[in-house]
Image (cartoon, helix red, strand yellow):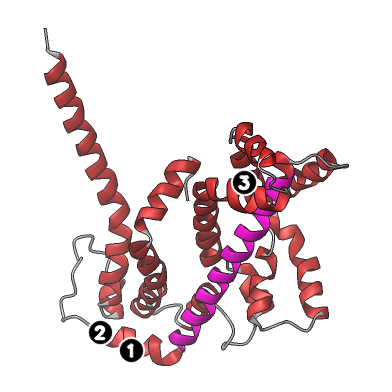
Amino acid sequence: MESAEKRARRNKIIMHIVLIIVSFIMIVPFAWMILTALKTNQESISVNPFYIFPASGWHWENFATVWKSYNFITLYKNTLLMIFFRVLCACLTATMAGYAFGRLNFPGKNFLFSLVLIQMMVPAQIFIIPQYLMVSKMGMLNTTFGLVFPGLVTAFGTYLLKTGYQGLPKDLEEAACIDGCNVGQRFLRIMMPLTRSSMISLGIFTAVFAFKDLMWPMIVCTNANTTTLSAGLAKMQGQYGSEYPTMMAAATLAVVPMVVIYVIFQKQFVEGIATSGGKL
């Protein structure tokens, strides 16, 4: 009979092989994007499946073309500002609302939380017209505030933080009450620091969803100087519809911010995803 040690070693080898294969499958599209960005247009549309590397040299001028056509510095700035303020507002409002729904008792609590759940069930596209009218009436079109506006509050974040607060032991709050802490002190000094993992998870999801948001930036920011990377790429697709190397060069430049953010906050990304049990 096969020993337990050999069985464990065999299972470990199989697991690593599967992970390597899956990793390779996930890396292929990114590698193909970068290699296509360095080809000529004729090379990029070749039907030869083994025509992977550029045959006529590395064409870095594709990056220079899109860099000159669109001000990527401005696109980077607008995108990073939108991500920063959406994450800040989402974590701030969700942690307060989550604490109220998870730990406090007040009239209409169940009714109000049911509205939060209903908002999670309704497609986000339904709110685009009312949100646009609100931003337009405030005169905030083509501004950073207009980009951030849909992310000021988050139903998903409220539910996530409510679950996090409900998972904390009641003894902590009771001990704080005995020591004379009021509601604000219990929230700021005792409970909120203990939900750090949930806030990290919310920040990660908010940042990724903000980066991928396409429809809202295209609607609220028609000016090229106030739009984001996702909307800018959509416009580039119309301008360079048949020039695949140029489009791939623009896509490569567009993913740089999220790659840098991930490299810097890699530990927090892993911790947040492992804690929430979700996937991006």
Relative horizontal placement of residue 160, taking residue 14 as reference (left or right):
right
Distance from Cα at disc 1 to Cα at disc 3: 44 Å
Q: Which residue is at a point 37% across and 76% down the rendered structure image?
A: 253
Q: Which residue is at a point 38% across and 61% down the rendered structure image?
A: 265
Segment tinted magenta in the rendering:
71-100
* Residue 271 coordinates in the image, percent (x, y): 41, 48
Q: Are marks 2 and 1 in contact (CB under 8 Å)?
A: yes
Q: Amino acid at mark 3?
A: Leu
Relative horizontal placement of residue 70, taking residue 213 as reference (left or right):
left
Distance from Cα at disc 2 to Cα at disc 3: 46 Å
**Secondary-structure class at tag 3:** helix
* Residue 50 coordinates in the image, percent (x, y): 19, 61
Q: Main secondary structure of the magenta part?
A: helix
Residue 76's tag is none
Q: Are marks 1 and 3 in contact (CB under 8 Å)?
A: no
174 is higher (above) or lower (below) than 242: above
Quadrant that contains the N terminus: top left
102 is higher (above) or lower (below) than 228: above
Residue matched to label 2: 60
Q: Are marks 2 and 3 in contact (CB under 8 Å)?
A: no
Name the residue at the bottom extreme: 68
Splitting the image into 4 quarters, where does residue 14 fall?
top left
Residue 268 on the magenta segment:
no
Q: Amino acid at mark 1?
A: Ala
Residue matched to label 1: 64
Residue matched to label 3: 161
Relative horizontal placement of residue 116, taking residue 265 as reference (left or right):
right
Circle nearer the N terminus (1, 3): 1
Name the residue at the right extreme: 107
Q: Which residue is at a point 16% across and 81% down the rendered structure image?
A: 56
